[in-house]
Image (cartoon, coloured by chain):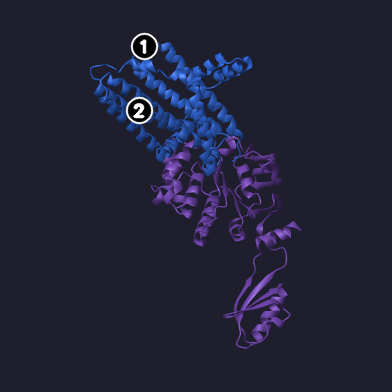
Chain colours: A blue, B purple
Amino acid sequence: MKKQRKFPTIFRVIEAIGRVTFLEIVRDRILYNILVCALLLLILSFLASSMSYIRPERIILDFGLSAVVLSCCLVGVLTGAGLLTKEFERRTLYVALSHPITRTQFLLGKFAGLVAVILVNWVLLSAVYLLILSYVAEKTGVISETLGVGLLLGLIQSIMISSVAVFFSSFSTTSLSVMVSIGLYLTGSNISQLRLVATRLKSPAGAFSINALAAVLPNFEYFNLGTQVTYGLPVSWRFVGLSVLYGLVVVGFLLLLAGVFIQGREV
Amino acid sequence: MRTILEIDQVSQSFRAGFWMRQARVLNGVTLSVPEKSVFGFLGANGAGKTTLIHLISGLRKPTLGSVRVFGFDASSIQAKSRIGYLPERPYFYSYLTGEGLLRYFGALAGLTSAQIRARIPTVLSAVGMTESRKIELSRYSKGMLQRIGIAQALIHDPELLVLDEPMSGLDPLGRKEIRELILKLSSEGRTIFFSSHVIPDVEAICDQVALIQKGELVGCGPIGQFLSEGPIQIEIGFKSEENLDYAQWKEFDSVRRMSEGYRGIVGGQEAVNHVLAKLLKNKVQILWVNPIRSSLEDLFARTAK
């Protein structure tokens, strides 16, 4: 019975685990709740814009983009926070880990499945958003390149916050992971405000601490174009490239740390 | 015969309680499993069977000692690629179909899509699950889950099967079917290591057994060797028209009246002969003569001495 054994490649493992994770998440009711809420928000923005006489398309622009990004972030946090914890609690990873794969490969597979769900959610909502926008603003030409960049950065942002949730779920409970991830998202989206607080502090030690915190926390402001989307102002490709790179580095770093933490976690 | 599983002075501790104190679950366990054998691992609940199986399957590393499978460290991918593992409870994704589950684990085992497609009918037929391959696992019965669990353990055609309580929770027919399946897999040349706390399950199919109690190995060898040790007791069931006081017969250790007659317990072969002759002389109808199997507790009590 002696035979040559082949080991699975990392891509094959990620694809197999990712596929199963995707199927698992799309069966989760919370995904549909978030999706329906986002769609309602998009319809609401459409209704609100019809009541406005001055630049109604801007209401849809702002509301719509926020709805798409928030929905993707919520999917990432609420499902990402339970991604590993559920596996340990339900012991579904036992048989998977008895195969010739590493725990880090398993983690990457789970994350790939989550990213796939976020991507589908993003594509679906972006399509509805652009459809509404194109219907309302046929003559105003609000569908600019900046809007596309805003949507892309929104996607990167939601993948980044998902990695934060997955990182915390590698050593903590689901509820704690959700709370800390949302807290980090809110703080990370206001890093400039944090730095402003540091400049107004009289204590140099306090200012240093806050600046250090601002430097360490994941900065979500790099992905928020704000008024640039509203007014269709151009965004430099250098900024876009660096933001995407920053997002990918943070994701990679957090997954690396999560990989280290789950190595030590007892099954 | 080649030894394919070597467990050498293995100890395992866990952190438990508020102060995270170390609790020792296995203590200096040493055993080896020869190739192509059916090896039973017998112990009461909480004795440390599942912990040792986790170490063999490479799910965790021992605190002390070593576990080597085919000469490789059990947690290495070389060892894992040659093991098929069935957990005690079938912890599988309930939304997958039987076939989907096999595709998933086949990919994790390193098989190509073509190899998986070729293996699925073979393993499903081996466990008698061909008809249920398209049904979601959430609709499977306990027996079906055990079977599909064994099928996933076989998907990559491993040389060593590690089964954690494969007959747990099954009805007598289900137990019989799993026993037959294990024997069939063994006849194909696989080595099978399985845990159980039920002596008849182990006795029926194992070449060798290891007994574990409170994390320590208390014996290892053929099961008959353990069962033949200690006092032999035989139960005689009989029906009598005469109303004699059988409890007064000195040959009986104990006698109990039942609706259709009496049950008497006799110790030793000589006493059985004597009692049977005496009963027949009194024109008593013998209903049955059965040796009393040792219970797990008896076995452990004896081996621990």
**In the rendered image, residues at marks 1 and 2 fall on the same chain:** yes
The three-letter amino acid code for the residue at tag 1 is Pro
The residue that label 1 is drawn on is A234
Of marks 1 and 2, the one in the foreground: 1
Q: Position of residue B299 (x, y in %)?
A: 69, 60
Q: Position of residue B301 (x, y in %)?
A: 72, 60
| Residue drawn at the location 43% of the way across and 11% of the way down | A238
Quadrant in the picture for the C terminus of chain B: bottom right
How many marks overall?
2
Residue A9 visible in rendering: no
Position of A203 relative to A95 (above/below): above
Q: Is residue A59 left or right of residue B126?
A: left
State the SS at label 2.
helix
Residue B215 visible in rendering: yes
The three-letter amino acid code for the residue at tag 2 is Val
Q: Quadrant of residue B297?
A: bottom right
Disc 2: CA contacts within 10 A as few (<14), some (14-19) or many (>=20): some
Disc 1: CA contacts within 10 A as few (<14), some (14-19) or many (>=20): few
Residue placed most toward the observer, A11 or A149:
A149
Residue placed most toward the observer, B203 or A171:
A171
Position of B18 relative to A165 (above/below): below
| Residue drawn at the location 65% of the way across and 69% of the way down | B292
Q: Is residue B87 left or right of residue B256?
A: left
* C-beta proximity under 8 Å, tags 1 and 2: no
Q: Provide the chain ID for the residue under circle 2.
A: A
Q: Position of residue A169 (x, y in %)?
A: 54, 34
The residue that label 2 is drawn on is A123
State the SS at label 1.
loop
